[in-house]
Each structure stands twice: as structure tokens, then as C-alpha cells.
């Protein structure tokens, strides 16, 4: 690719017959060099902007990957908590059935306690989901704010 300096330094052989007017050629070359220099600088600036934008896109993609991993981890944790709660509920049920043969009244009290614990775990699960959702919304807001800048 020619540079503005290449155009500025270009010389032409002089001919005696049928040659061009040197002043006209030099004036034209000055205009071409000025326009070319402007375009050359503009191209360099656009390349730098493109490089910066590509870096920004890469940065936001890494943030997106992080958010996706967070969502996956949150879902996995939620599934684990749910499975643990279900196992605990099943264990409680089986124990309750065995204890029912011995003492019905104490069994009713125990079931009420375990159901309360289960409800607490469900509430904790809901709180955990709300926190994760809030965190993700905050991250999306940051991404959206950065995109607007």
C-alpha cells in the first residue's frame, strides 16, 4: 500500500515533446497526497477502533461465559438442595411410619418439626434463587450500561 510519503516523493521523467506540465502534475500530486494522507490516517484510526472493539467484545464474551458458569453452578446447587430436601423428606417419612407403631402422639410432633425444617429449606432455596437472580440482573445491567458507553 502506498503511503503519503511515497506519493510525495514520486518523480516523473521529463520529456520534451508531448510531456505534461510539471506544475500541473505537481499540483495534482499535492492534492492526491493530501487526500490520500487523510484517508490513510482515517484508516489507521478505524483499525485502532476496530481493535479496541474486538477487545471489548472479547471481554464481554468472557463476562458472559462467567455468568453462564454462575447460572450453571446455581442450577446445580439448586438441584442438589432439592435432591437433599427430597431425600430428607423421604427419610423422615420412613422413620415416621416406623415410629407410628410405637407412639402416635410423639410421631405427630416429630413430623411437624421436620415439615417446619423442610419449609425452612424451601424458604432458603427461594432466598438463594432470589439472590442469584438479583446478581445476574446486576451483571446484565453492567453489561448493558457498558454497551451504551
Image: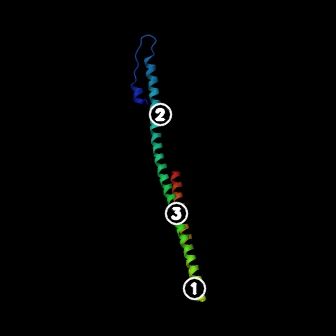
Q: Give the alpha-carbon distance from disc 2 to disc 1, as whole Å.
A: 88 Å
Q: What x and y, as percent, mark residue 51?
A: 45, 44
Left or right: 1 in relation to 129: left
Badge 2 or badge 3: first in the primary sequence: 2
Q: What x and y, as percent, mark residue 104?
A: 61, 88
Q: Give the alpha-carbon distance from disc 2 to disc 3, as whole Å.
A: 46 Å
Residue under circle 3? 135
Disc 2 crowd, CA 10 A, few/some/many (<14, 14-19, 20+)? few
Q: Is residue 3 above or below residue 26?
A: below
**Residue occupying the point 47% across, 46% down:** 54
Residue under circle 1? 99
Badge 2 or badge 1: first in the primary sequence: 2
Describe the colour scheme in one phrase: rainbow
Disc 1 crowd, CA 10 A, few/some/many (<14, 14-19, 20+)? some
**Residue occupying the point 60% across, 86% down:** 100
Left or right: 10 in relation to 133: left
Q: Secondary structure at mark 2?
A: helix
Q: Is residue 17 above or below residue 110?
A: above
Quarter-wise, where is residue 16 in the image? top left
Amino acid at each position: 500500500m502506498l503511503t503519503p510519503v511515497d506519493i510525495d516523493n514520486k518523480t516523473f521523467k521529463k520529456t520534451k515533446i508531448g510531456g505534461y506540465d510539471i506544475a500541473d502534475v505537481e499540483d495534482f500530486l499535492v492534492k492526491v497526497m493530501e487526500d490520500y494522507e487523510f484517508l490513510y490516517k482515517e484508516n489507521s484510526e478505524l483499525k485502532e477502533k476496530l481493535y479496541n472493539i474486538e477487545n471489548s467484545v472479547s471481554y464481554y464474551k468472557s463476562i458472559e461465559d462467567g455468568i453462564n458458569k454462575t447460572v450453571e453452578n446455581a442450577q446445580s446447587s439448586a438441584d442438589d438442595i432439592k435432591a437433599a430436601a427430597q431425600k430428607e423428606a423421604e427419610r423422615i417419612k420412613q422413620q415416621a411410619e416406623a415410629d407410628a407403631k410405637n407412639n402416635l402422639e410423639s410421631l405427630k410432633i416429630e413430623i411437624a418439626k421436620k415439615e417446619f425444617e423442610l419449609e425452612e429449606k424451601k424458604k432458603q432455596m427461594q432466598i438463594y434463587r432470589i439472590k442469584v437472580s438479583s446478581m445476574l440482573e446486576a451483571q446484565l445491567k453492567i453489561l448493558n450500561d457498558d454497551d451504551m458507553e
